[in-house]
Image: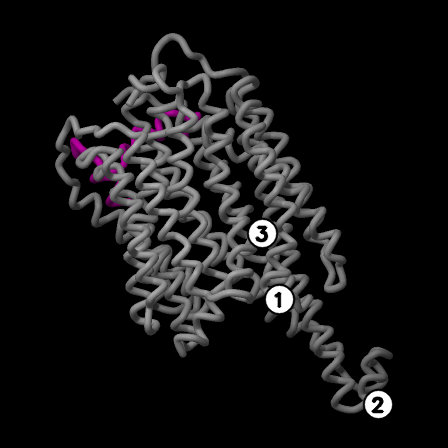
Amino acid sequence: MSERKAEQGWLLPLSVLIVGAFMSVLDTSIVNVAVPKIQIELSAAPDDVEWIVTGFTLALGIVVPVSGWLGARLGMSRLYILSMLGFALASALCGMAWNLESMIIFRVLQAIPGGILPVVSMTMMYQVVPLEKIGAAMGIYGLGVVVAPAVGPVLGGYLVEYVDWRLIFFINVPIGLLGTLAALAVFPRDRPTSWPRFDLWGFVTIAYGLAALLLALSEGQDWGWDGFRIRGLIVSGVLSLALYVVIELEVDNPLIDLRIFKVWAYTNSILLLGIAVTGLFAVLYFLPQFLQVVQGMQALDAGLVLVPSAAVLVVLMPIAGRIYDRFGPRWPVVIGLSIMAYGSFLMAGMTPDTPRADLEIWTFIRNVGVGLAMMPIFASGVSSLPAALTGAGSGMNNVMQRVASSVAVAVFSSLSSSAAAQLMNDRGSLFASGAQSLPAVADAREQGAPGLLGLYQTLNLNVLTETYNNGFYIVGLLCVAGIALALTMRSGPAKTTGGPVHVEV
């Protein structure tokens, strides 16, 4: 594929790659909006319907590490085409699901090509695009990776509210088929040059470790963080990942070559990627909840609040890529994380009566930072690796994205629930009667049950808002910590001479 760089340029093949990345990433956020409707349509219990999302997440954690081996065994172009077809077929099956059990099974099947597509897309991008243009390419590619989660709630809310929830799956079928035809026309029929042996024990240990930790984080709130099941999953998951590291350092053909972590620029980018993705998904999780639960908006209206912040990403991603090509990653990331922190602290000051316009402005400001920082973080890490390790770096990037997004939703949700319970317990003293009671409580008691109910509802909304604010405040602190890491990044354009970076074995 490298011979085609000079012949036809890189914009056309990159555009085809974006289709697969956008489609697979969009599906992780668009389904969340439809879960309540799916629960009603399929007559499912609230605890059971969560497995539509949990099963998808667990399958992603298992399949992403093996994507690099599949690419080496089948060829990247062939694997991309098969994944596009598989995703379209699995999406059609999801749209035809007749009960909850079939939906969960089809979602797991959908996650297999859905986890492979972003890994293959990024690996192929580094084969198609010259090093000196990688920032601009990542800016365009980022429209699929970062904008998709922001667009998901809006598109999903519209389809669920005005059309049919099944369309959120069926819409992938024509996109997948068109993307497959485009890939057949643009990409060469590459053949694998090696037949690496499958690292079975490495796969077993990393698959179980990631699945156990993701399951613990997803179900910790319902099963109880102090329960035997959650503790067992966390301990066994950590031990399994530790065993995976030991195995990968000894085998000849590791699933993910851990030598990537010997390059500090890459390791630093992985840490920053975890911070950025955690902040992005925490806001995408908390804000729609606040808008619907506290302010009483419908799903589509809540999604429309995020439109300005999604639009700024569309504009800034390509610009940030060109800034990276010219100035390097350090200052775009430092400035971007600073703006993200500022926007998060603004959102930490929300009240139940905060105007919609203020929320749109605050999320807009915050996503200016996301748009500046995200693609330089992506590009600086993988581009610092030698060509032989690009696939491993892309795979680990996707593992970090999946884990960080799951951790953001699970951990922040648990913290929110715990804080809400504590705050409600503390604020319950406000309802004390007698000479020490507050005037508002005394007035409410005079009105009888309706007055006390109204006071309780007001208190509950204030407590919920405060828990969301705590989440935004933590996100802001994480961004501040990321600034310190960003200051150690490279400044200046990437060197295009002197050959690739070498890693000592």
**Quarter containing the C terminus:** top left
Q: Residue at x 47, y 56 (%)?
A: 30
Which image quarter: residue 446?
Answer: bottom right
**Dot 2 corresponds to which residue?**
446
Mostly what secondary structure, the magenta segment?
A: helix
**Quarter containing the N terminus:** top left
Q: Residue at x 74, y 51 (%)?
A: 358
Which residue, as the protein is rendered here, is positioned at the far top?
Answer: 498
466 or 350: nearer the viewer: 350
Tell me if residue 425 comes above or below residue 465 in the rendering: below
Q: Amino acid at mark 3?
A: Val
490 or 102: nearer the viewer: 102
Q: CA distance from mark 2 to mark 3?
A: 41 Å
180 or 119: nearer the viewer: 180
Q: Which range is magenta?
A: 240-266
Q: CA distance from mark 1 to mark 2?
A: 34 Å
Give whichever of discs 2 and 3 has the lower sequence position: 3
**Dot 3 corresponds to which residue?**
283
**Dot 1 corresponds to which residue?**
298
Can residue 233 be seen at all in this image of the molecule?
Answer: no
Give whichever of discs 1 and 3 has the lower sequence position: 3
